Image (cartoon, helix red, strand yellow):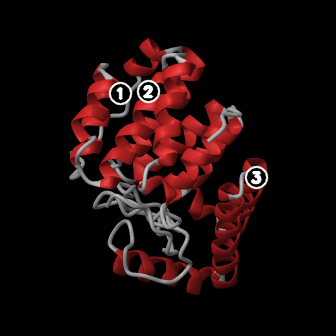
């Protein structure tokens, strides 16, 4: 999930990893890190794909030629776009229905659908969410944010201590803020310190520090502290952007928790 997840569709291939501003998934890459999918809502076709976009396109193209599934692949991409729009509008259940539809149309998409995992978290379908993120990380062993979100799902299922024992270790994220966030979730840490360190940095860094500080507190069942940081992330300059899926997620989080912004 670069520090912004822009959403240009990428045709997924049955190989490689993903990036979130650090992630990249099958269809829409995130632009935070160097290997993730976009989480922005620009439905144009850019070359900011998660993995090696040339390999992805050629492999999926060959596969479609053999199976005659090119139409299904296009329909699946459209379904994912619809799901992302619905999520941003706060219709989380509707987004999952579209993501599931995309998988029916093109089963290859499931291995990269980080967007579905996020939606499942907000429907309290934590076991399915954790499964989705584990599948994602299996494709992209360098995806920091998918690792964290798997932890967040499993913390709700088993508690933070047990979830940490199951923590998915991934490669080094190029973004300092996500490296620190990853270490905090993996080993335990101080969310306040994370926010303080990046409070005077780039707008994107403050946003992500606040977002993940709030999510960390939620994993510890400290709702009041989680609210402070999630609301701060939404109100930050970066949180007002429309081109990053995670900025929308922060707002959806507050909406689901019935927190006023």
Q: Position of residue 4 (x, y in %)?
A: 39, 61
- Disc number at residue 44? none
Distance in Å between CA atoms under marks 1 and 3: 28 Å
Q: Is residue 45 left or right of residue 109?
A: left
Residue annotated with mark 1: 185
From the viewer's perspective, is residue 99 above or below residue 93?
Answer: below
From the viewer's perspective, is residue 199 above or below residue 59?
Answer: above
| Residue in the image at 47% along x and 49% along y | 136
From the viewer's perspective, is residue 150 above or below residue 241?
Answer: above
- Check the image and name the residue furthest to the bottom: 65
Q: Residues within 10 Å of mark 1 (few under 14, many from 20)?
A: many
**Earlier sequence position, callout 1 versus callout 3:** 3
Location of the C terminus (image quadrant): top right
Q: Are marks 1 and 2 in contact (CB under 8 Å)?
A: yes
Badge nearest the viewer, 1 or 3: 3
Q: Are marks 2 and 3 in contact (CB under 8 Å)?
A: no
Residue annotated with mark 3: 91
Badge nearest the viewer, 1 or 2: 2
Any part of residue 92 in sight: yes
Residue annotated with mark 2: 216
Q: Is residue 126 left or right of residue 5?
A: right
**Earlier sequence position, callout 2 versus callout 3:** 3
Q: Residues within 10 Å of mark 3 (few under 14, many from 20)?
A: some
Q: Position of residue 49 (x, y in %)?
A: 39, 72
| Residue in the image at 33% along x and 45% along y | 206
Query: As rendered, which of 242 and 23 lies closer to the eye?
Result: 242
| Residue in the image at 49% along x and 62% along y | 241
| Residue in the image at 64% along x and 70% along y | 81
Q: Is residue 43 left or right of residue 162?
A: right
Q: Position of residue 142 (x, y in %)?
A: 30, 49
- Residue 125 picture quarter: top right
């Amino acid at each position: 999930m670069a520090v912004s997840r822009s959403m240009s569709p990428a045709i997924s291939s049955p190989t490689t990893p993903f990036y979130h501003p650090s992630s990249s998934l099958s269809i829409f890459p995130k632009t935070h890190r160097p290997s993730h999918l976009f989480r922005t809502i620009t439905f144009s076709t850019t070359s900011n794909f998660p993995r090696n976009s040339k390999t992805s396109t050629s492999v999926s193209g060959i596969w479609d030629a053999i199976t005659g599934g090119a139409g299904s692949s296009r329909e699946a991409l459209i379904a994912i776009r619809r799901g992302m729009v619905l999520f941003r509008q706060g219709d989380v259940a509707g987004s999952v229905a579209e993501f599931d539809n995309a998988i029916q149309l093109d089963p290859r998409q499931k291995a990269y659908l980080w967007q579905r995992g996020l939606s499942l978290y907000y429907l309290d379908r934590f076991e399915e969410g954790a499964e989705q993120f584990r599948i994602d990380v299996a494709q992209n062993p360098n995806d920091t944010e998918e690792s964290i979100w798997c932890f967040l799902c499993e913390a709700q299922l088993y508690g933070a201590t047990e979830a940490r024992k199951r923590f998915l270790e991934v490669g080094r994220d190029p973004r300092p803020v996500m490296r620190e966030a990853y270490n905090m979730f993996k080993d335990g840490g101080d969310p306040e310190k994370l926010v303080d360190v990046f409070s005077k940095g780039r707008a994107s860094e403050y946003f992500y520090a606040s977002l993940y500080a709030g999510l960390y507190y939620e994993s510890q069942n400290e709702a009041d502290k989680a609210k402070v940081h999630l609301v701060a992330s939404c109100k930050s300059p970066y949180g007002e952007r429309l081109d990053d899926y995670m900025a929308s997620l922060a707002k959806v989080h507050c909406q689901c928790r019935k927190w006023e912004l």
